[in-house]
Structure formats: structure tokens, C-alpha cells
Amino acid sequence: MQSSKLYSYLLVAIQFGSIGGMIWLDFKLLAHPLVLLFLVAGLAVGLYAIYCNKNFNIIPEIKEDACLIRHGIYRYIRHPMYFSLMVSFFGFLLFGSAQSRLLYLLLLTVLYLKADKEEKLWHCRDKEYTKYKQNTKMFIPFIL
């Protein structure tokens, strides 16, 4: 159990390191109109996801009192907060330096690993999760 939590915290640290690294390396991009558009769009998705799921948790662990959310954006995707980060920093993939692009790919990898861990935990906790998973996409509505 301890190693599982350590793994969760490591993923979160890498996630924030990737985001911080992109911003640090290409801070000037924050003035680019399309980069700002992606940031605002991603932030809007993230805020809506938090509004729909008051039991939000930054680490890929399930809180004891958590219940499966199936309304709002969760009707379409299982991990809208991760989707919001993908959208928010997509401009760094398009317009950033080679290092920022690598950090964006690292961020995608970490988000996938976090989502995978959460899904394994939900499968053990809630029998309805398999049905929910069949009716929703992992990250991108109607696509992936």
C-alpha cells in the first residue's frame, strides 16, 4: 500500500514538474493568442469538472467517501481534469521549444499512468465502473 501511495505522489510530482518546466522554458508563449486560448479553454473545462465533482483529488487515489460521478462532463469522459491539462498546455506542444514538446509528451504519459491507476482502483471498488467505462471515453469526448 505504501509503495502505491509513493507511486501516486511521484506521478503528481512529475506532472507538476512537466507543467512548471514548460512554463519556465517558454514563458513568453503565454502572450501568444492561441496559447492563451488553449489555456483558457483548458481552465474552463477544469473548472466545470470541479463543479461536477466536488470530491476532486489531485493524487490518483480514491477518497473513502468518493462516489462515481456520471453527470456533467463525466457523462462523456472519465478524466476531464486530465483532458483540461492536455488542452491547457497544447499550445506548448504546437509553439514551444523542443524541450517543452518533450515535457508535454511526458505530461501526457503521466496523465495516462494516473488515469490507468485510478481506473484499476475504481474497478476494485465499484462494479458499475465497467459499464460506465463502456459508455464513456477516457480523455477526449467521443474520440479517445
Image (cartoon, helix red, strand yellow):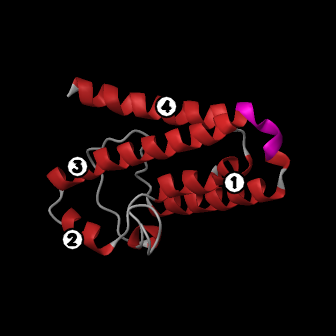
Q: For residue 16, which quarter of the picture?
A: top right
Q: In this figure, which residue is indicated by the disc labeled 3? A: 120
Q: Are marks 3 and 2 in contact (CB under 8 Å)?
A: no
Q: Residue at x 23, y 47 (%)?
A: 121
Left or right, 27 with respect to 90, comes to right
Residue nearer the viewer, 32 or 120: 32
Percent coordinates x, y for residue 83 in the rendering: 51, 57
Task: State the SS at label 1.
Answer: helix
Q: Are marks 4 and 3 in contact (CB under 8 Å)?
A: no
User: Does residue 62 appear anywhere in the picture?
Assistant: no
Point out the residue furthest to the front here: 98
The residues bearing labels 3 and 2 have C-alpha atoms spaced at a distance of 14 Å
Percent coordinates x, y for residue 92 in the rendering: 69, 47
What's the magenta region?
Answer: 24-29
Q: In this figure, which residue is indicated by the disc labeled 4? A: 14
**Residue 39's disc number:** 1
Q: Is residue 96 magenta?
A: no
Main secondary-structure element of the magenta-colored stretch: helix
How many marks can you see? 4
Q: In this figure, which residue is indicated by the disc labeled 2? A: 131
Residue nearer the viewer, 93 or 86: 93
**Residue 83's disc number:** none
